[in-house]
Amino acid sequence: MRSEAETDLELSTLSVRAGQMRTEFREHSEAMFLTSSFVFDSAEQAAECFAATGGEHFVYSRFTNPTVEMFQRRLAALEGAEACIATASGMSAILSLAMSTLKSGDHVVCSNAVFGATIQLFGTILSRFGISTTFVPLADLAAWEAAAAKPGTRLFFVETPSNPLLEVCDIPALAAVAHKAGALLAVDNCLCTPILQRPLDLGADIVIHSATKYLDGQGRVLGGAVLGSKNLMLEGVLPFLRTAGPSMSPFNAWVVLKGLETLEIRIQRQSEGAMLIARWLEAQAGVKRVFYPGLESHPQHALAARQQRGAGAVLSFELDGGRDAAWRVINGTRIFSITANLGDVKSTITHPATTTHGRVSPEARAASGIGDGLVRLAIGLEGVADLRQDLARGLGS
């Protein structure tokens, strides 16, 4: 849980200092507790710890571990959340949220501009358990309100900015619609991170992270997190984690803790590079459109400027010539890594229609605006001039 003493510190300080728990050895770096279980002084103490429901005792690393707890405390401080539950991946964070807040007969309203696996989870897997989902356009508040009229609506789920088209939704306005319907608003904050956006401050109830991405920042480990009120996390998500076990490992928690220490400087530098690349792409022949909220041409540019502290490091662009043109650009690169992951210090490039959204139906891709000519970039820490030259090979510039 967040410490009250940390609430007034700057994000750069919280990224480095928040949540640390030192042992009797007084280590400066966070300790890594690679243990499956913890011992007790007596049977009475063991019984007391196992009976606790708030996660305040270390019992078994499936649901309580000091290294994981340090990560949870630090991320909660950064997001301004009362509590955080760490998970094995970003998708297990979304699953943990769903399984702890929904039941058969409930209804979810979800943006159609979300990660492909999120669409599969809500649209296919959860439907097997009697949970229905309506997918709506991200920025269409009237569509959200109409969908929320369905009985049993319990959860709104959104990515903002979205992946891969970088659409932005009005979080305070959407929170008002959700709360009027008696639903919770969950925001996937993967692309912005708390450095650029804090959804809880804007009215959201829950924040989701794939720690695999920018929180780690170097493509080393998998991880996820769910953040929100103490009541929602400790009485809802934690019991599911304790029983079902989609847990973050202590090693992965330690790696992400190290990643958080450089989060602010990475996000700022990578965002600056993305802006330069986006402006350059707008001037290239064969590029029909660039999707990046930092550009004045973006339809939600003003909204992004109002609710985010930067436009982020991910952008997409659409090419004339469809898939052939997109693959020509991708295959022409020598510096960009051809991979669907993002958030790395190494710049990545991918073709969403055949990778991240390849298992989504053509109809759903079309509804989301993901065409065959779309290419997504996640800008790392390389020289911008080198990245431009790398893209120019396939663009014929």
Image: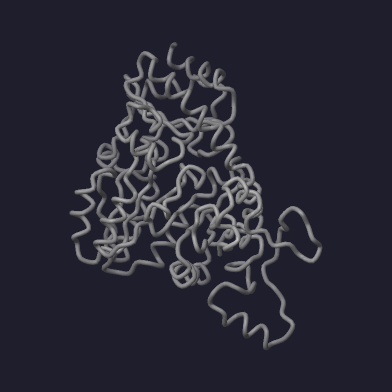
Which quadrant of the rendered structure holds the N terminus? bottom right
- Compare residues 124 and 190 and report the one nearer the observer: 190
Report the coloring of the rendering.
Answer: one colour
Quarter containing the C terminus: top left
Q: Looking at the image, which residue is at 52% across and 44% down?
A: 195
The residue sitting at the bottom extreme is: 44
Q: Observer-nearest residue: 318 or 227?
A: 227
Residue at 63% x, 71% y is 60
Task: Check the image and report above or below for 99 versus 89.
Answer: below
| Figure check: 31 above or below 286 | below
Judge whether 392 appears above or below 156 on screen: above
Image position, residue 262 (x, y; %): 63, 42
Task: Out of 394 and 354, give the one closest to the viewer.
Answer: 394
Residue lying farthest to the right in this orientation: 25
Q: Position of residue 279 (x, y in %)?
A: 42, 21
How many marks are shown on the rendered structure?
0
Question: In x, y percent, where is residue 98?
Answer: 38, 62
* Residue shown at 70% from the left, 65% from the top: 35
Picture quadrant where residue 20 is located: bottom right
Residue lying at the far top in this picture: please name it. 397
Is 314 displayed left or right of 51 in the figure?
A: left
Left of 259 or right of it: where is 366?
left
Task: Name the residue located 59 percent from the left edge and 67 percent from the top edge.
Answer: 62
x and y percent of residue 66 in the render?
66, 64
Q: Is residue 265 left or right of residue 194?
A: right
